[in-house]
């Protein structure tokens, strides 16, 4: 499990799904690998179902408890159904407020 990210889903059949976060990439437009004051970035998350059954009602929950104060992002992203062998690519916008000091 990746710290600060969790997945929730419901199961409707007997073959179980098996979900994993296979990739997390932080992209910001300047390319300096720092989120400047007032800047926006994208968190790209790939979720894969390696199980034999579909996962229904999947939600990605992001927690900012281990992040500096001053970041704004959507805490819950609805994914929906993920079929066996399927990957879902998600993008979550992260915005930095002006009052946060620069960090890398």
Image (cartoon, rainbow, N blue to C red):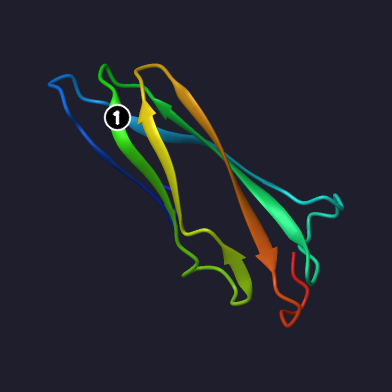
- Dot 1 corresponds to which residue? 55
**Residue 82 at what x, y percent from top left?**
38, 26
**24 displayed left or right of 39:** left
Viewer-nearest residue: 54 or 2: 54
**Residue 35 at what x, y percent from top left?**
76, 63
Which residue of the protein is positioned furthest toward the bottom in this rendering? 99
| Above or below for 78 versus 32 | above
| Above or below for 29 versus 44 | below
Which residue of the protein is positioned furthest toward the left in this rendering? 14
**Residue 7 at what x, y percent from top left?**
35, 45
**Counting other residues with Cα less than 10 Å from the Cα at mark 1, is it few (<14), some (14-19), or many (20 or more)?**
many
Residue at point 73% right, 83% down? 99
Residue at point 40% right, 16% down? 85
Residue at point 78% right, 70% down? 38
**10 displayed left or right of 31:** left
**77 displayed left or right of 44:** left
| Above or below for 48 versus 32 | above
**Residue 4 at what x, y percent from top left?**
45, 58
């Amino acid at each position: 499990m990746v710290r600060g990210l969790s997945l929730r889903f419901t199961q409707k059949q007997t073959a179980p799904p098996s979900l994993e976060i296979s990739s997390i990439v932080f992209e910001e437009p300047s390319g300096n690998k720092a989120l400047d004051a007032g800047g926006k970035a994208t968190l790209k998350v790939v979720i894969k179902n390696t199980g034999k059954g579909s996962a229904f009602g999947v939600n990605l929950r992001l927690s900012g408890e281990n992040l500096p104060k001053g970041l704004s992002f959507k805490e819950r992203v609805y994914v929906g159904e993920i079929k066996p062998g399927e990957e879902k690519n998600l993008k979550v916008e992260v915005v930095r407020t002006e009052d946060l000091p620069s960090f890398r």
